[in-house]
Amino acid sequence: MPPTLSVQNLSIEYAARRGKVRAIRNVSFDVARGDALALIGESGSGKTTLGLGVVQLLPSTAKITQGNALYHRDNKTIDALTLKGKALREFRWKECAMVFQSALNSLNPVLRIADQFGDTARAHNYLQGRALKERAEHLLTLVRLDPERVWKSFPHELSGGMRQRVLIALGLLLEPQLLILDEPTTALDILTQRNIMDVLKELRGKLDFSLIFISHDLSLAAELADRVATVYAGKIVEFADVTTTFKTPAHPYTIGLINAVPTLQGAKEDLTSIPGSPPDLIELPSGCKFHPRCPRADARCKRDEPELEEIASGHRVACWNWRTT
Amino acid sequence: MAVTSQTQPQTFSLLARIERITSNYVLRRIVKAMFTIWVVVTITFFVVRAMPGNAVDILIQDLTAQGFSADEALNQAASLMGIDLNQPAHEQYLDYLANVVRGDFGKSYRSRGLNVADMIAQVLPWTLFSVGLSLAITFIIGIALGALIAYARDTWFDHLISNIAATLDAVSPYLIGLLAILLLGVTWKIIPFSEMRGALSPGIQPEFSLEFFADAFSHVKVLLLVYVLASVGSWILIMKSNTIATLGEDYVTAARARGLSDFRILTAYVGRNATLPLFTRLAISIGFAVGGSLLLERLFAYRGVGFLLADSLGNRDYPVMQGVFLVITFAVVFSNLIADFLYGWLDPRIRIAGGGN
Amino acid sequence: MNALRDGIGGFARETIKTFKLLARNKMGLFGFVMTLVIVLLSFVGPIIWQPETSANVADINQGPSEKHFLGTDFQGQDNLRKVINGGKDIVITAFLTGIIATLLAVTVGAFSAFVGGRVDSALMELVNIWMTIPKFPLLAVIATVIKLNDPVTLSLLMAFLDWPGLSRQVRAQVLSLKKRDYIEAATMLDLGTRQIIFREILPNMMSFIAVSTIFTMTFAIYQQTGLVFLGIVPYSGANWGVMISAAERRGVLYTAAASWSIIAPIGAIVLFQLALISFARSLEEVFNPRLRTSV
């Protein structure tokens, strides 16, 4: 069976005063049915752009310069990047729902939660009235909210964690095949974060959908994802299933990210952060974009940029020196 | 908790009650409106009676100059203003307050014997009609054009409308009025301004007939145009910047991600949120329009409260002046109250903050 | 003293930055240059082109010609010359009102924001009430009681009526600036309130305050000429407002031949207001990137 989403050779640029921001450079990946893929990287690495690109919600200064995003359902394949007008509107949310990073601000402050569910349902000729309410109550219960209380509320009457859960429930309303969650737990306190993660894990067990999970936090990815793609400077530099990523990471950047995650047992001294800062996406370094921060960089890394190569079954990495890491 | 309520139950419940009152949005607005009116009435008393060289003193001087004896002048002034001038100042103030509450603003000094309240009642409807109608037109045009150019940002249309709006906003209303008369009446000779004096042509009576409405409209149309031109600029510019700000909000992008129709996003998501802050501006706008009516009604010889006030200012007819000013302020405060209620009704955040949920 | 010097330094830095940005903005440049021209012409002009003292019966109510660029009035006097001689009072009153109102507004607004609590809410409630009172009618009523012959008294009165709007904005700005990280850092470093105000907060608010001052100035022009038009402020001198109202009283609006004697002063006021506002709007654009056109 073809994958639910297959992104191929995608490149996205932003026009800025200084020049072109090359946010996504020739990225390809697949998300299989029911699969959960985590996109991991520091902020500014282009993860969010990738998600916005798939649903065509990039700001007007951005341009998709090449590539496609093939979406598959019921023996039909479409390129999500060529959709326009009505077809695009129907694709959004019904096929692919993207929940944004800014949960606190993603709901219209002047409409009740009920109305925002209603709006969404009406736009897609989905259930109405009584049936809609029952479906929504079911979903709200799934995300551990009290439907009675939430349904008639305005967004400002709910806490940040509650709003995030409302958005997740809203994301699942139309039974989409693909859910994109962009940093769903940032800006939330640690307990709320925990709660959301539990809800998400539970949902994955109960419902059938594919998931793209965008985060800078490797530990969260480890809990939720089946596979992990590490993104650096607008490119995927390592791709593997979640166990491989943590047990035998091959790219120095992935290793750096793992070492930067605090563990319960680990001593504080073991924590190391990656030296340097993310690259300037307008004037990218030559060769491997990670070489200025890489402990193993040599002359070749400065000269040529490595492409992803398969080093084990399902484990691909873009590094000249992966053998020595 | 139990200890507190035992030791001072009285003060506690009283405070709680006051708290509840002050936290009630509607009640708080009403109290504020009444307080505003009291402040204005007091200021007016100060100007009319208590300030050195106040209105009453000037009135008495005027009367003495006309040949009245000092005593007669004092009595005359007192009867016109409706206050006993021999009483101490604070008694006069209380009398004055009582008069205002009863709607008694004294008698006109120039048009002898005419009741100020009656004079105002006669002209007030015309001002309410012209200012209210122009405000509604301005609001609609301003919101529509402002939102439109925000969507069409950086096109030639946006530049054109924005520049016109900025220009209109810069120029004083009565100058726009003068230019309108010069252009429409003198240069192009489209409108015979000399026949348009007053709110109605001679012989036309207020009644429910086509003739009456047509005549009333033909007298008010240029004034309406000038009111709209004078204030639409700032509405357009504010609505434009509000809309641009709202378009950048996450909930608008999120609504697009949910596949909502453009129309639904424009109305319920962008439009409603961009329009909300405008309601707080209505206050300033109403005051501004009323201030403008003072000059514009005088310019167009339109017999509304502005005209009456301009007339009384020129004649130093203090009882009329004071009455009209108070009525104008009451009208503005009352319109503000309505705008506040509208805002509270439209914005759930306000409703909750004050509603005591 | 140090804090004050730093404040001036910060102010100068901000001003230079502003002018650099403004030079790129056509509207702003027009507004700034035109304001400068009007101010100069109003102060220096009367020395070169002194007012005419006698009537000129041969040239009554003429349109523009080579001899009279803006035509002549009912006494046959040159309109352009009258306009040049009639600007000083208007300009002085506008600037004075703008400055006094701004000082009042900044003081009250900043004070309210810094003190906070009950004083703050009481002050702001008062400001809100003050804002609902229709200013121009009140000014007109007061003007019938107080003699407003000189620009200073008039400016003081107008400033006293017009400051509240700005003070509310200043308060909001100070509150939002107070929350920013660097102010918090400065507070923690214990730099002292004066230094925080002069060095951190005021320079950040300069542009915004300048914009409000300019808006107050145009409103002052409106009110001042409006009072003359109503015949409340006595005709002292020959300012633009007096020219308009004299022409209007002579029925110029209904005789085409004489219309230039009212167009001239209207044009002068409109030009002054437009110049001020385009300057202010471009200041706004420069400092509010959201409004800035094209990235």
Image: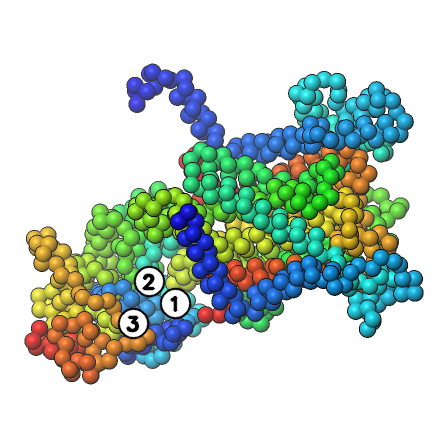
Quickly name the residue at label 3.
A280
Indicate the position of residue A314 as horizontal and vertical percent values: 14, 74
Which sits earlier in the primary sequence, circle 3 or circle 2? 2
Which numbered circle lies on residue A57?
Answer: 1
- The residue under the point 49% across, 54% down is C206
Q: Provide the residue designation for mark 2.
A: A98
Q: Is residue C104 left or right of residue B257?
A: right
Chain for mark 3? Answer: A
Chain at numbered mark 1: A
User: What residue is shown at x 73% (from left), y 31% (from top)?
Assistant: B53
The subunit letter for the residue under badge 2 reads A
- Can you name the residue that lies furthest to the top here? B7
Residue C38 percent coordinates (x, y): 67, 62
Q: Residue at x 68, y 21 (%)?
A: B89
- Which amino acid lies under the numbered mark 2 shown in the image of this protein? Met
Do pointers 1 and 2 mark residues of a single chain? yes
Label 1 secondary element: loop
